[in-house]
Structures are given as C-alpha cells and as structure tokens.
Image: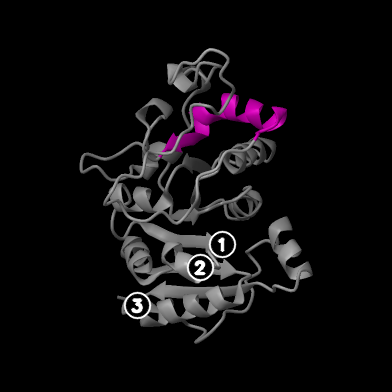
Amino acid sequence: MPDPDDRPAPPTADGPRGAHPDAGARPGDAFQHAPNAEGDPIRTFHPRRAALGERRADALERLWPRFGVSVHDPALGLPPTAPDGTLDAARLFGRSAPLVLEIGSGMGDATAAMAAADPGRDYLAVEAHLPGIANLLVLVEEQRLTNVRVAHGDALDLVRQTIAAGSLDAVHVFFPDPWPKAKHHKRRIIAPEHVALLRSRLRLGGTLHCATDWAEYAEQMLEVVAADPGLTNPHGGFAPRPAHRPVTKFERRGAEAGRPSRDVIAVRTA
C-alpha cells in the first residue's frame, strides 16, 4: 500500500488529477466510457448514468486515487503494468498474492464480504456503473480492506489488453445482465468466445464461477462451460450454493420474485 503522502491528489470538481475540466462539474463527471467504434467487440453492458449521492460522491473523490484504476482513461489512472504490458498486480496491491477478478461487481456488497473473509487473496473488481464503484469504495473504507481494488470500464477490454495468460486464481461473474430478449443474447458475457478468453487467463486449477437468477441464462451457462475444452465442471451440473458467495439484496429480490439463483463452477484443466 502506498504511503498516504505519496498518493496522487484526489479528484476535484474539475475531475480526477485535473482531468476533463468543466465549470460546475460534479464528482464522477470525469468517468466516461470509451466510445465503441465500428468493428469493436459488442459490449456486454449498456452504459448509463445515475446520481451518486453525497456519501458515495465523497468516497469517490477521496478514495479513487488510492484504490481505483480506469480500464482505458490515462487521466483517471491506468493499471500499473509490467514491461510486457500486462497487469503488475504486485504494484497495484502492494504485495504478491493470488488474484481474483470480479466482473460486474454491482454495488460491491459481495466483493467486500468475500475479500474480508479471504485476506490471503487480492480482489480486482471491474464495474461499468459508477454508483457501484463508489459504493464499493465506501465498503472498502468502512471495513478497512487492503486486498480490494476497483476498476471502471469494460472488464473484457481489461482482460484482452492487460491481464496475462494464466495469471488469475479465479474469475467471478455474478448476476451479469441476462439480456433476456433473443436479439440481445449476443451481448451476454457468458458466451463461448468470452469464456475461452477468461479461461485463458486462469491458472491451471483456477476457477470460473458464474451465478444468475435467470433460468434460461443459467442453462446457457452450463452449456457454454461444458463445451469449452479447457474447463471441467466438477459438479456435472449446477453447483451447490457455495457458502463463500454472500446473499446480496439483489439476489434476495430475485428470490422473492420467484427467480432462485443458480451457480455454475468450472475449473481450468487444460
């Protein structure tokens, strides 16, 4: 962990580290998604804006320079990299430890709880929506977590561009957008090409853990995992609910609406 006196200056009303100056700007205004150009991979999320609220805005201003990185924006601070251009996790976390990649960490409740219960591993939570990032920063401070970092942007872009092959201990994809309309299924993150990419970044023996409360998507997850030649499902079907995955408010609401959650867990074996 860097010494507090060595940290970059916190974001101001003019944007983090002086980025994107705009009179009257609010905390978070500097956080934009990179334009999706023609020929770029289809995004698995829909960028949207939402109010942060005073508490989250304050956490974002104070804590982003210490715990946050941007997938694509140098003005917000890119992840530290090794000479070969891949993520230098030891510099990011201030130590060497097994790394868990959390894709779509939502409001951060599950990430914070798992990281608190698992201090021997580091958690890099990637989220596209700013309120979730800010809320996780609140939880990191409240729980004094040293093994969590947050990234804003497209998780798949981060994996493609920065995460080294075989460098992850686990990848978690909990309750991704189900994109329920058939014409939008191409946007689902658990698809053959994405799973092959994620598997390539896992170490041998590393774990891909997915969860959803959308029944049809859960079946697709099973099929995609079963079809990947480098993954093995030790349960043969849906996994028993792991005790280490906390129940979040989002999951409880789904259960109350008649959508029980299902877990798909696979291990990289080739």
Give, as a single range, the part of the protein colored magenta.
51-70
Q: Is residue 211 left or right of residue 81?
A: right
Q: What residue do we see at 31% from left, 47% from top?
A: 162
Q: What residue do we see at 54% from left, 61% from top?
A: 176
Q: Amino acid at mark 2?
A: His
Q: Which residue bears the numbered disc 3?
A: 228
Q: Position of residue 51 (x, y in %)?
A: 65, 34
Badge number at residue 209:
2
| The quadrant where residue 57 appears | top right
Circle 2 crowding by C-alpha within 10 Å: few under 14, some 14–19, many from 20: some
| Camera-side residue of 101 and 204 | 101
Circle 1 crowding by C-alpha within 10 Å: few under 14, some 14–19, many from 20: many
Count of numbered marks: 3
* Overall secondary structure of the magenta section: helix
- Location of the C terminus by quadrant is bottom left
Is residue 248 in view?
no
Q: Position of residue 186 (x, y in %)?
A: 41, 66
| The quadrant where residue 200 appears | bottom left
Q: Amino acid at mark 1?
A: Phe
| Camera-side residue of 23 and 3 | 23
Circle 3 crowding by C-alpha within 10 Å: few under 14, some 14–19, many from 20: some
Structural distance between the alpha carbons of marks 2 and 1: 8 Å
- Element assignment for label 1: strand
Ranked by sequence position, the earlier of labels 2 and 1 is 1
Is 61 colored magenta in this rendering?
yes
Structural distance between the alpha carbons of marks 3 and 2: 14 Å
Q: Amino acid at mark 3?
A: Asp
- Element assignment for label 2: strand
Tell me whether circle 2 and circle 1 mark residues in contact (CB < 8 Å): yes
Ranked by sequence position, the earlier of labels 3 and 2 is 2
Q: Residue at the far front: name it.
A: 183
Q: Which residue bears the numbered disc 1?
A: 174
